[in-house]
Amino acid sequence: MNRFASQLAVLAFVLAAGPLAAQQPAKSPADTTLKAAPAESSSVTSHTVTIDGQTIKYSARAGNLLVKNDSNAVIGSMFYVAYTKDGADLQHRPVTFLFNGGPGSSSVWLHLGSFAPVRVATTDAEPTPPAPYTLAENPFSLLDRTDLVFIDAMATGFSRIAGKGTGKDFFGTDQDIRAFGDFILRYATVFGRWNSPKYLLGESYGTTRAAGLANALQARGMPLNGLVLVSSWLNGYVDFGGPPFSLELTYQLYLPTMAATAWYHHALPREHPSLPQLLQEVREFSLDAYQHALNQGSHLSDRERDSVVAKLHEYTGLPEEFIRQARLRITPDRFQKELLRGKQRTVGRLDARFVGVDHDAAGESPEYDPADAAINGPFTTAFNQYLQSELHYDGGTTYLTTNYPVVGADWDSRHRVAGGRWPIPDVSEDLRQAMSQNPYLRVFSANGYYDFATPFFETEYTLQHMGLDPVLEKNISYGYYESGHMIYLHQGALAQMKHDLAAFYDQGQTK
């Protein structure tokens, strides 16, 4: 899907760390709505995992908690799987709430890919062969630092609208933030975690949710210790234009991701031995000469145009004539199609290390995302087997790995924050407010170099332009990894991210 095609289409569908909406069959209302409110229940099993030579005994609890409206009527049931270290002091043991995005994605991707004590094995940057899949101990789990609670958004996983609830209670930016806030408050009450250090870890649209939640929970008396933002999407106006951002900025912020991808595929006209050094050059060019050229419009001189065309060729590997005909404005989908056109191959959107083959090699954009196509089977199959064989949980209905058509069809993208209600969410303002009012709130931004869904330079730009007081800038730290949107698909990147997050949590515990 072309991210430039429609603001709402992008918001509702393409930000998920999982299969695209267009590839999913429509779901009937019966798949997402329960006739009666269920009771809160769970299945608890005991396990061990070895992390850095330390054997940890832990409990896995798969269950549901109810969400109620202001009249105390049940409107939904949210599914979760919690991993808690046995015998821990809950007053000092951190708890982290994790979720993917979409809107319309369950959290199975983070659950079986990143920091849970189990992980599904996938082939790096290539399709994984069909079943049987391997689910094994995860040596990169964060369970040595924090308890983990994976939450499925409403109408995904086993989370279901129930009782007096309707889609309008959940399918929107603010509604979604409210529902997750209700769940977290309920979890803290049921399991005695109000005084535990608390973190949120969101991926993709999950970072939109996390930033909004940080502010919302704080307003409800629950300030957080930290946020982990993986492959962030925080401000739609940076993508689509609108005060105070120009649409031309979008081309600039994607350029470093294009350079990284061309570097990975050895498609640049000359060698660059250091990827970070190359990307710093591209950042500086993007916000200087490239920005100036784009802003000149039809008044751009031939001399300056030739200079910028040459630089774009140097940084993207695309033919100069193609760049010239595109008026210096290269959209992500056209880049993904054009980079390896001579080899009749395309590169992935979620992870540009993956390579695809289109039926129409002469087309304008890829027919599918090869990274997306490679991950659906292993995660869906392995998780359903895991629920039955290890967690002993029966949800009584279909586990909806993704459910974009139902969740996204009527998604209310408006977002209310101090200063008004905006048609596209800008949760960077929520984050600024939360960090300003809670100067102990720390943020870790994790970024994949080869991610075209949420490019890393866009994340940098957003965080550096949200108006945070300079004294608080030290509370934001960054990690960069040679992987894509789902950073953990590359085991080396997962190992490095675990190392970085271990330090992040340790720093929070020593304050």
Image (cartoon, grey):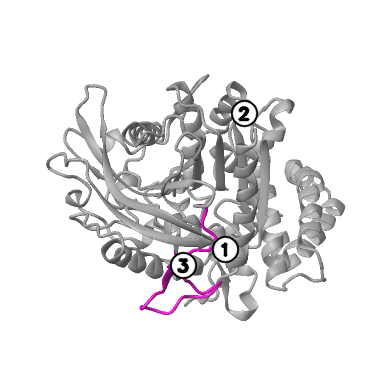
The residue sitting at 65% across, 40% down in the picture is 507
Q: Quadrant of residue 339?
A: bottom right
Q: Which mark is residue 440?
A: 2
Name the amino acid type tagged 2. Tyr
Which badge, 2 or 1, comes first in the chain's sequence? 1
Near-viewer residue (325 or 81): 81
Q: Are marks 2 and 1 in contact (CB under 8 Å)?
A: no
Q: CA distance from mark 2 to mark 3?
A: 43 Å
Q: Are marks 3 and 1 in contact (CB under 8 Å)?
A: no
Q: Is residue 306 left or right of residue 227?
A: right
Binning the other alpha carbons within 10 Å of mark 3 as few (below 14), some (14 to 19) or many (20 upward) gives some
Dot in front, 2 or 1: 1
Binning the other alpha carbons within 10 Å of mark 2 as few (below 14), some (14 to 19) or many (20 upward) gives some
Q: Quadrant of residue 118?
A: bottom left
The residue sitting at 82% across, 61% down in the picture is 310
Magenta region, mostly helix, strand or loop? loop
| Residue where numbered disc 3 is placed | 368
Asked if residue 29 shows in the view, the reply is yes
Q: Measured from the top left, where is residue 285 in percent x and y?
A: 80, 50
Residues drawn in magenta = 119-142
Near-viewer residue (151 or 316): 151
| Residue where numbered disc 1 is placed | 53
* Kind of element beneath mark 1: loop
Which badge, 2 or 3, comes first in the chain's sequence? 3
Near-viewer residue (298 or 48): 48
Q: CA distance from mark 3 to mark 1?
A: 42 Å
Q: Is residue 275 left or right of residue 363?
A: right
